[in-house]
Amino acid sequence: MRGLMGIVWVVMLFCMPNSLKLHARPLEINLFSEKNGKGLESDQKIMEKVLAELGHHVHCRYLYEPAINPSNVDVNIFFQVIPEQWLPYASHNWFIPNPEWYTQEKGLLDRVDLILCRTREVERIFRSLSLETYFLGFTSVDCYKSEYQKNFSQLFHLCGQNRQKGTLPLVNLWQQNSTLPLLVLVEQIHLGQSFPNSNNLYLISQRVEEPTLRFLQNTSGIHLCPSETEGFGHYIMEAMSSGAVVVTTNAPPMNEFITDERCLVDVESSAPERLGVKYYIGSAALEKTLQKLASIPIHEKRRMGWDNRINFLKKEAEFKENLSRLLLQIGESACRRM
């Protein structure tokens, strides 16, 4: 393990952004998101932290906050929704979309200066609309806890309140097959009424506190993340950060994060979802993938999980570098105008 940690440090040093804090001047940035205790609020916190590390002045705002005598800023950054009333008060308006949740008029997209794309799939979608895009990437909370040991006979699925995580095919499979290993499933969509606990299925039908969640993420050797769609993929990235083997859907953007074919579940059908696409797996395809994983030795699974963690760290470093490079251009142009 000491050797693996050495590899991680080499990766982090190699990927460390060279342009951090090299901006011509600190920028004034409004950061808009929804305070919902879920993914959008997490997005805002992650972005706020990185922007502050880069030396900028960040003003976190609610998406639906009225624009009453606002100060002009250098950049507005909007997550998922474009609040029109704030567009006139920034030199640059940037939008970070989740295509599957975009419900505003398409014409409104022409009023932002740049679409910041967190996945290549988002980049593809918005380029097809002839919009200016910039590949940003992103990151998630690092959930890794070195004090825990992985149990590759225990599987984990975090559904929460989201019905697009591919939970039902997964639960149906476990109900049909009592020989499958233990699956711990955290959900808040009331599955427990229809699917009681069994010898190999343990449902936690409530929100769990962070220490408990980190314990489950770090002790479960295999995370099942067969999402129907993802705006970014915090669900998958958090699993990667913990050093687990991650099983996900063989469709974009999910297969941008996990590329090992042994961990990809084939799609049964698909359907449009606003500007995005939803992909559905079946229980049979999931079972086939799990059978392949069952034949892999423990030491190989451990290596696969550690590769996922290294890729998480790479993606985080790339995001910071991409953001720093973009803001440096804005800072330099602002100085030239002074």
Image (cartoon, rainbow, N blue to C red):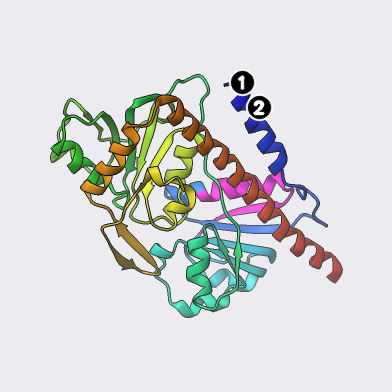
- What residue is disc 2 on? 6
Given contact means CB atoms under 8 Å apart, are the residues at marks 1 and 2 in contact?
A: yes
Q: Residue at x 83, y 57 (%)?
A: 24
- What residue is disc 1 on? 2
Decide which of 137, 303 is in the foreground and name it: 303
Residue 16 relative to residue 335: left or right: left
- Given the image, on which type of amino acid does mark 2 rest? Gly
Q: How many residues crowd mark 2 within 10 Å: few (<14), some (14–19), many (20+)?
A: few
Decide which of 85, 202 is in the foreground and name it: 202
Q: Which residue is drawn at 86% across and 68% down?
A: 336
Q: Circle 2 sits in a helix, a strand or a loop, which is it?
A: helix
Q: Which residue is drawn at 69% across and 34% down?
A: 10
Magenta stretch bounds: 43-62
Decide which of 297, 336 is in the foreground and name it: 297
Q: From the image, which quarter does the N terminus lie in?
A: top right
Q: Quadrant of residue 213?
A: top left
